[in-house]
Image (spheres, rainbow, N blue to C red):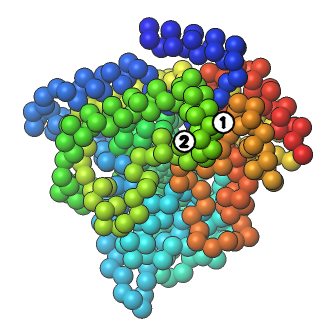
């Protein structure tokens, strides 16, 4: 009911006044927020917790471990792989070059030397020739991120890597959906239920352990972590509710207007609204934040999301409408030469983000923003994770990316208007 009234009001406002479309939207409803709040106020027994955990672990016999966040899962894997680095023999990890800052920091904290693997920006596939050259006897792990809702086939890559006994970790934080539960060619798959992700559980994630060998050690390690309090989860859900309201285009218009009046950078305001624990850079504090178990109501919401993923035949209504919008926008943009639509050769795109590459992007961002389209060049800390400027595609992504707003609530006429602005941009 609330959604209907709110949606109607939103549509009216879009027709009457200048719209400001945010570069991300949340896959959540006021009903789901209310359920999470209700669950975090209930009492649970130890047996409830055990039952919820086993439901999650055994969902479709997939061995999904609930984790506090995708980053927690990555940290847990690095702990159990237990390569004790010696100064003269530093182990190496190869990572695809687009990810978030913390995913690069974690292996460094564990003593690994990080090597960056480039990807093709049309297909999102890693550069296999470069991969062969990067592998040395010290290479222990390869991390491949499945980005923007795309799933690439990992078999060709696994063929190269497995000859060298390298562990493969698939990072699907941006690519959770009902058709993909991880590649059978990898050892671990990570998923995220962070607030901005599809099927959000207001935080948390899943770690799928494909390799039997590691299941017990992962399970034992996760059991040693302290359990987050229900009150903390309630606070997180409440903050998420506020962010949900703030991400409506009415609120965005207002924030944008106020930020402009005070000469403040709107991107910074957006990033502050969007951040979860992205700001924490001190290694010891970072690990303390990740090494936790989800509270019982949080487990219950994660179990609900897994059910939803299994039970929705295609994807949920919001994602389906976003996909249609994304396909339309892609087709329009492919006609414009000076723009590269990232991932345009992948049919599996779900448009969790809609990145394009364009030269002179600040000018384009200015023009789009002046006309009511909140395009940005940063998506929290996601981007190139190499430390040096390099002649590669991931670095080019950092220099040229513009995230366009592409969501179901944007009327087609407005999408066309945005495309026209990009087309006429010199
Ligand atoms: C590619 C990628 N990996 C990992 C993460 C971290 O996910 P979480 O917030 O669940 O730790 C993110 C978050 O946006 C991401 O985009």
Tag on residue 374? 1
Q: 37 or 208: which is nearer to us?
A: 37
Q: Which quadrant would the N terminus be assigned to in this image?
A: top left
Q: Locate residue 419, reporting x and y percent.
A: 81, 32
Mark 1 and mark 2 lie on one chain; the one further toward the N terminus is 2
Q: Is residue 423 left or right of residue 158?
A: right
- Label 1 sits on a secondary structure element that is loop
- Residue found 59% across the figure and 41% down from its top: 262
Q: In the displayed image of the protein, which residue is found farthest to the front?
A: 262
| Residue beneath the point at 57% across and 64% down | 385
Q: What crowding class fits label 1: few (fewer than 14 Cα within 10 Å), some (14-19), or many (20 or more)? A: many
Residue 235 seen by the camera: yes
Q: Which mark is residue 356?
A: none
**Which residue is outermost to the bottom?**
88
Q: Please report contact status of discs 1 and 2: CB closer than 8 Å, yes or no.
A: yes
User: Disc 2 designates what residue?
Assistant: 270
Alpha carbons under labels 1 and 2: distance apart: 10 Å
Q: Position of residue 86 (x, y in %)?
A: 36, 87
Q: Position of residue 373 (x, y in %)?
A: 70, 33
Position of residue 52 in the picture relative to residue 174 (left or right):
left
Location of residue 28 by image quarter:
top left
Answer with the quarter of the image where residue 294 lies.
Answer: top left
Residue 191 visible at all: no
User: Is 388 positioned to the left or the right of 2 in the image?
Assistant: right
Per the image, label 2 sits on a secondary structure element best described as helix
Q: Residue at x 56, y 76 (%)?
A: 135
């Amino acid at each position: 009911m609330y959604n209907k009234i709110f949606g109607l009001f939103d549509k009216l406002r879009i027709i009457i006044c200048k719209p400001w479309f945010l570069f991300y939207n949340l896959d959540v409803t006021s009903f789901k927020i209310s359920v999470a709040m209700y669950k975090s106020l209930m009492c649970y027994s130890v047996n409830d917790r055990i039952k919820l955990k086993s439901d999650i672990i055994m969902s479709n016999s997939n061995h999904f471990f609930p984790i506090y966040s995708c980053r927690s899962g990555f940290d847990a894997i690095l702990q159990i792989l237990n390569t004790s680095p010696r100064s003269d023999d530093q182990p190496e990890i190869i990572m695809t070059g687009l990810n978030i800052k913390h995913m690069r920091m974690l292996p460094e904290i564990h003593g690994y030397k990080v090597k960056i693997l480039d990807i093709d920006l049309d297909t999102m596939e890693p550069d296999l020739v470069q991969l062969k050259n990067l592998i040395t006897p010290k290479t222990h792990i390869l991390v491949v991120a499945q980005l923007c809702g795309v799933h690439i086939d990992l078999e060709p890559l696994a063929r190269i890597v497995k000859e060298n006994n390298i562990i493969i970790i698939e990072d699907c934080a941006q690519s959770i959906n009902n058709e993909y539960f991880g590649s059978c060619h990898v050892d671990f798959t990570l998923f995220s239920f962070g607030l901005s992700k599809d099927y959000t559980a207001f935080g948390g994630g899943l770690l799928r352990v494909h390799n039997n060998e590691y299941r017990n050690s992962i399970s034992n390690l996760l059991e040693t972590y302290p359990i987050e309090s229900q009150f903390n989860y309630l606070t997180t859900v409440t903050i998420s509710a506020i962010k949900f309201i703030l991400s409506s285009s009415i609120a965005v218009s207002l924030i944008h207007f106020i930020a402009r009046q005070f000469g403040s950078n709107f991107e910074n305001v957006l990033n502050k609204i969007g951040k979860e624990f992205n700001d924490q850079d001190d290694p010891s504090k970072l690990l303390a934040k990740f090494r936790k178990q989800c509270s019982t109501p949080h487990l219950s919401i994660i179990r609900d999301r897994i059910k939803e993923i299994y039970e929705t035949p295609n994807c949920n209504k919001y994602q389906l409408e976003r996909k249609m919008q994304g396909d339309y926008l892609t087709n329009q943009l492919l006609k414009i030469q000076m723009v590269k639509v990232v991932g345009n050769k992948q049919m599996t795109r779900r448009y969790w983000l809609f990145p394009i590459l364009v030269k002179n992007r600040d000018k384009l961002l200015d023009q789009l923003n002046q006309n009511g389209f909140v395009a940005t060049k940063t998506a929290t800390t996601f981007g190139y994770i190499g430390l040096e400027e390099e002649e590669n595609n991931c670095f080019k992504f950092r220099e040229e990316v513009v995230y366009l707003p592409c969501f179901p609530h944007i009327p087609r006429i407005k999408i066309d208007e945005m495309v026209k602005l990009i087309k006429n941009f010199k």
